[in-house]
Amino acid sequence: MLIKPIGEDFRIIGYYLGRIFLVVAAASLLPMAWAVAGREWHPFASFVLMAGLFALLGVLGLRARPETDRLEWGHGMVVVALTWVIVPVIGAVPFALSGHWANPLDAVFDALSGLSTTGLALVQDLDHLAPSLNFWRHLLHFLGGQGIIVAALSLFARGGGITLYHGEARDDRILPSVTSTARFIWAVAAVHLIVGVAALGLVANLVLGFTPIRSLFHGLMIFFAGFDTGGFAPQSTSLGYYHSAIFEGATAVLMVAGAMSFGLHFALWRGPRRAIFANLETKTILGTFGFTMILTLVGLAVGGLYTSVVGLSRQGFFQVLSAHTGTGFATIPSAELAGWGGLAFGGMAIAMALGGMGSSTAGGVKALRVGITVKAITNQVKAVLLPEAAVVGTSYYQSGRRNLTTELAQSAMTVSLLYVALFFLGAGVGIAYGVPLQEALFESVSAGASVGLSVGVTDAAMPVLLKMTYMFQMWAGRLEFVAIFALLGFLYAWVRGK
Amino acid sequence: MIGQGPKRHRGLADDARGGLITFLIEIAIVAALALVALLVSAVILLLV
């Protein structure tokens, strides 16, 4: 029998939502300050309105005053799922008031795309968008990639912190407490921010000839979108705007760093480093990256799209890396990417679907699940082929030897299947609206795996239902389903429970 | 216990060294993958 939620359940959820909204309200001060510095008074007013709304909701949430502040598992998941709905809606206010988005739905689409680190965009005339609004777009990547919840946890983490942490699709608990883990995640981000912005800014200034202020702006925007595997760019031509192999190289380093799990960051930072390449996750991602890159390069060469070694390797490598890390930067226009048919399309689509490492800012199925699924299938095949008396090994190495239990294999396969279903959902809706199969599948995988590469389907003129389907894919794909199911279960229990 | 002295506290220098090694490994990974892409491209274009 389903138990109907009571007032205390709503108070706990409201209280934690309130805390998180106050963190976002504080983050809203940054674009506000940027607008003041740039004397952009219209965006400034819209940021004040947005911050006020977050603060108001935050204060209302705190006033819920539950009897206990201990979060049950279900409460935590509902808090996470609702956070990722409400923050994009309120976060879209400055976009909706700017005149650069055709309607409020498009503004919410971009805010959700930013927060979920996807990078698909419906913004119009991006090249003339106010810098403070551009800053807010990219800051949404940073908030979503590092995790609003992680941000909140690093400030407060009394009862229930771990539930919120898992709800945001993170598994690694690197340090003994979830608070110290959250703080380590932010420390890694802070160091990468300083080094990344300095490197990109220097390249922009010394190689591309940008002014120091412009270099800093572009360095910061590309850092947010690269390290958080987001994919927004300050210019409509994405990374192609810079026409610079060095700039692409520096960005690629940030993309790789962003797609690495925080467990791996911790091992690189504090050791032991020797075991890193023995991990199933590392071996899997290196293997799948190599496979999809070769597939794409062969496809491009056979298609005759690139005839020089440097051209083929540069475009193929960057696009596949962008797809596999879930970033979504492109150095070629959408129309050119749409021409990547056959094997090149297959390589890119598989790379996007597989995604980066677990507990990273990347989306997709994730390397550890892929590795576990492949290993489980291999073990099954071995068990069939070998004599009945033979013992098939059921362990794998991931920061130590671990047992590959049936439950673990089932869990990895279930989530992988849910991703496949999510990709087919978006592709099906696209096809229903007359989008060609290949393009519908590419765009759907891009949305569901939080990538953001586009072959031109995502456009302000696309049907409302297709926009909403992609929004659902971005939301469900980023949270890896569990929090969504918990929210649906909570709502069902509220309506039908006793 | 014999041979087990007091644990040394991690200082700023340790963290700075760890951070530097992290960046060097990240750069090395990208450089290695780009080099592989270049070599594979050369081989593919020779064969196609």
Image (tube, rainbow, N blue to C red):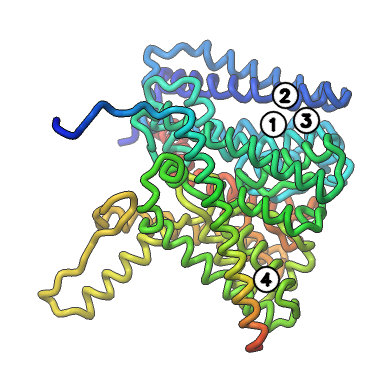
Choose the circle earlier in sequence order: 3 or 4: 3
Residue extending farthest left: A389
- Residue for point 44% across, 20% down: A12
Dot 2 and dot 1 residues touching (CB under 8 Å): yes
Q: Which mark is residue B13?
A: none
Chain of the residue displaying label 3: A
Tell whether A389 sits left or right of B17.
Answer: left
Q: Are labels 4 and 1 assigned to the same chain?
A: yes
Q: Are labels 3 and 4 assigned to the same chain?
A: yes
- Residue for point 72% across, 72% down: A310
Depicted A375 relative to depicted A89: above or below: below
Please state which amino acid type lies under the numbered disc 3.
Pro
- The residue that label 3 is drawn on is A94
Dot 3 and dot 1 residues touching (CB under 8 Å): yes
Q: CA distance from mark 3 to mark 1?
A: 7 Å
- The residue that label 4 is drawn on is A313
- The residue that label 1 is drawn on is A91
Q: Secondary structure at mark 1?
A: helix
Residue extending farthest front: B3
Q: Which mark is residue A50?
A: 2
Q: Secondary structure at mark 3?
A: helix
Choose the circle earlier in sequence order: 2 or 3: 2
Q: CA distance from mark 3 to mark 4?
A: 40 Å
Is residue A115 visible to us here? Answer: yes
Local packing at callout 2 (Cα closer than 10 Å; few below 14, some 14-19, many 20+) is: many
Q: CA distance from mark 2 to mark 1?
A: 7 Å
Q: Secondary structure at mark 4?
A: helix
Which residue is nearer to you in this view: A203 or A43? Answer: A203
Depicted A311 relative to depicted A325: above or below: below
Dot 2 and dot 3 residues touching (CB under 8 Å): yes
